């Protein structure tokens, strides 16, 4: 019996230390960062690129985000995340001839909310206020993924400087009938919702300043289930039909190309039925943000007396 008591007494400090993470399992985070669209407009100086290969750095825009993290174990956590960002695209920023001539542009505010799961490949080590300095670099590295919702509403600037919401203008002939021109069947564009599901995937790094405060950096690519973040996806619908149904402003945004519509269908042209956007991939967006975290430790009602 005495041996059991001695073993238990010796193991108590180690068992207590192994449960320390539970005292700081709740954390609120808030930060600022940058956002960029991976869509149809602008991008690299060639056709056929995708994701990071099609990134236009100059269109990086701000993002603000926050969240609440709850640790399930020393290596696993769940997080509720919400944020705002601005996304934009502009064909005139690429030197690829057909994209540049297309001359489409847009911007949108985007509001996101998601539930995420985190797994630490390098476990978080909280700094003790009594720990010796220089003994360890307590960097936490983790991967995360989840499921969320986002709201967007693309708009573009007209010749008079006024900004117009693009969805009501139906720039790809949404709501109109299928037509046949010179034996070629031309389908109108698909209607799309401004609220969509998304899947954020990324990596994070966190460094504790002390027991309560930390700073972190996260980078994520968010996959969506829509190709209309920038209001561009399918083919050109007859511009005269769009003008007759929805007006001159809609007709302009449907085809603001810098040269007149070509007489003969050629690659990169803007004739009815020619490709207006890339339908192979849905749109994505990415965030990189620096955040500050605060652990909710609570206060103890009892104190150790000597």
Image (cartoon, rainbow, N blue to C red):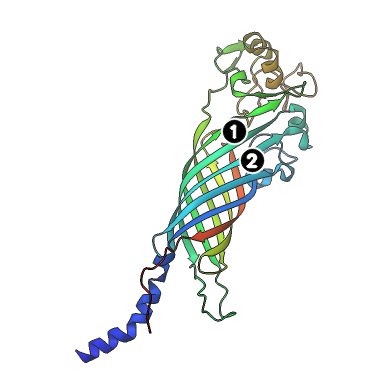
Q: Mark 2 — residue? A: 37
Q: Residue at x 62, y 10 (%)?
A: 245
Cα distance in 3D space between marks 1 and 2: 9 Å
Crowd band around label 2 with a 10 angstrom C-alpha radius: few (<14), some (14–19), many (20+): many
Left or right: 110 in relation to 15: right
- Towards the viewer: 266 or 47: 47
Q: Mark 1 — residue? A: 229
Q: Quadrant of the C terminus?
A: bottom left
Please tell me whether mark 1 sits on a helix, a strand or a loop: loop
Above or below: residue 122 compared with residue 171: below
Q: Residue at x 62, y 50 (%)?
A: 32
User: Marks 2 and 1: in contact by CB < 8 Å?
Assistant: yes
Please tell me whether mark 2 sits on a helix, a strand or a loop: strand
Residue 109 in view here: yes
Residue at the farthest top position: 244
Percent position of residue 233, x then y: 60, 29
Above or below: residue 107 compared with residue 291: above
Percent position of residue 64, x then y: 60, 46
Quadrant in which residue 204 is drawn: bottom right
Quadrant in which residue 184 is drawn: top right
Q: Report how many numbered discs are placed on residues in the image.
A: 2
Left or right: 244 in relation to 190: right
Q: Quadrant of the N terminus?
A: bottom left
Left or right: 53 in relation to 65: right
Which numbered disc, 1 or 2, marks the residue that appears first in the sequence?
Answer: 2
Crowd band around label 1 with a 10 angstrom C-alpha radius: few (<14), some (14–19), many (20+): many
């Amino acid at each position: 019996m005495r041996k059991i008591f001695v073993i238990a007494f010796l193991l108590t400090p180690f068992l207590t230390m192994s449960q320390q993470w539970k005292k700081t399992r709740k954390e609120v985070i808030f930060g600022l960062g940058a956002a960029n669209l991976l869509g149809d407009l602008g991008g690299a100086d060639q056709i056929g690129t995708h994701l990071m290969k099609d990134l236009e750095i100059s269109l990086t825009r701000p993002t603000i985000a926050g969240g609440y993290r709850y640790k399930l174990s020393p290596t696993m956590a769940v997080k509720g995340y919400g944020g705002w960002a601005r996304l934009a695209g502009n064909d005139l920023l690429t030197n690829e001839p057909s994209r540049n001539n297309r001359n489409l542009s847009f911007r949108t505010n985007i509001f996101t909310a998601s539930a995420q799961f985190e797994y630490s490949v390098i476990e978080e080590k909280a700094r003790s206020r009594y720990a010796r300095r220089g003994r360890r670099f307590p960097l936490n590295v983790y991967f995360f993924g989840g499921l969320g919702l986002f709201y967007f509403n693309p708009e573009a600037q007209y010749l008079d400087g006024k900004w117009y919401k693009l969805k009501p203008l139906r720039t790809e002939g949404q709501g109109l009938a299928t037509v046949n021109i010179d034996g070629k069947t031309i389908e109108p564009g698909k209607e799309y919702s401004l609220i969509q599901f998304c899947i954020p995937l990324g990596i994070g790094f966190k460094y504790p300043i002390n027991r309560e405060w930390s700073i972190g950096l996260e980078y994520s690519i968010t996959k969506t289930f829509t190709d209309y973040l920038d209001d561009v996806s399918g083919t050109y619908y007859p511009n005269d039909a769009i003008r007759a149904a929805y007006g001159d402003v809609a007709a302009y945004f449907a085809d603001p190309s810098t040269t007149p519509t070509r007489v003969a269908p050629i690659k990169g042209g803007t004739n009815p039925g020619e490709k207006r956007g890339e339908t192979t991939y849905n749109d994505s967006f990415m965030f990189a943000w620096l955040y500050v975290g605060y652990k909710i430790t609570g206060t103890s009602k009892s104190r150790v007396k000597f």
